[in-house]
Amino acid sequence: MPTPTWSVMPQRRDTKFGLSADNISTWLQGSPHLSHFLNTFSLFLPVGERFFIASMLPYRDRIRDPQLAQAVTAFMHQEALHGREHREWNCLLHATIPGTPEFEKSVGTLLNRVLKRLPPSYSLSATIALEHLTAILADAVLRDERMLAGGDPRFVSLLRWHALEETEHKAVAYDLYREVVGSGLYAYLLRIVSQLIAMFIFWSLALSEYVRILKVSGELGNWKGWCKWIYHFFIQSAFMPKVGLEWLKYFKPGFHPWDHDNRHLLTALEHYTQRAS
Ligand SMILES: [Fe+2]
Ligand SMILES: [Fe+2]
């Protein structure tokens, strides 16, 4: 069985951020188009983090490497805390934007169906697919300060904490997958097919919900807002194009999340470790 290239042991940091409903629609540069794009991502997170944890549970007793077992437990603790903080974020959104509670619930129902009706290896392959997405989004956010510049410090701090911990645990689910499903042809095909399906479903749901939120907010026809969105996410730092290029690396047969060594970013976690203690 292949062993991880090397590991970073995740830690639990119980941190609170005190978000406020006052600026839920404008917390990033006063722009509903920028703020709601990231608010839409938040809607997926509590149910998504629960799914990640549940997809690992059937394999917990089969882990032979004690380091990996420890990392899996830490991963679960981290995702549970991310879920808690994004639940708080989403409550503020639910109180402001009609239809968002129903959307979040429908994503939860879809993920529960996957867990109940498909083999556990399929759920775990969906988890590693989505963990790759969170890891590359996190890396892009942490590398380019312009992404969150001009944002309410409470939302920015929460997102940076989440991005840092996503980086810290980016290989845990993948290493578990390699230990319990393997790294042969079947494991490779399963992970790439899952990646394609997961991205198709995620982006279809995310973009349609984003547009719906802008519509109910009366911002759909605000072309200045759309120009700002395109400039911010596609032009200014080529954020989305860079994320797209990183995403493609997943299809390399010998891919491992730590092929991209960005451990140096983790020094910023010190701030949150001190805050939590
Ligand atoms: Fe997370
Ligand atoms: Fe994660």
Image (cartoon, grey):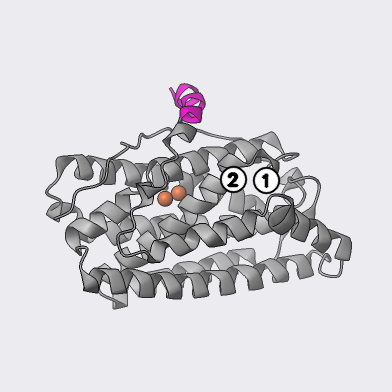
In space, the residues marked 2 and 1 are separated at their CA atoms by 6 Å
In the depicted structure, whether residue 63 falls above or below residue 222: above
Q: Residue 16 location in percent, x, y?
A: 53, 34
Q: Are marks 2 and 1 in contact (CB under 8 Å)?
A: yes
Q: Residue furthest bottom?
A: 117
- In this view, the residue in front, 169 or 136, is 136
Q: Mark 1 = which residue?
A: 147
Residue type at mark 1: give it: Met
Q: Mark 2 = which residue?
A: 141
In the depicted structure, whether residue 127 falls above or below residue 198: above
Residue type at mark 2: give it: Val
- The magenta stretch spans which residues? 267-277
Q: Secondary structure at mark 2?
A: helix
- Earlier along the polypeptide chain: callout 2 or callout 1? 2
- In this view, the residue in front, 159 or 186, is 186
- The structure residue drawn at horizontal position 52% and vertical position 67%, both measured from the top left corner, is 105
Q: Is residue 270 magenta?
A: yes
Q: Residue 260 location in percent, x, y?
A: 42, 47
Label 2 neighbourhood size at 10 Å, few (<14), some (14-19), many (20+)?
Answer: some
Quarter of the figure with the N terminus? bottom left
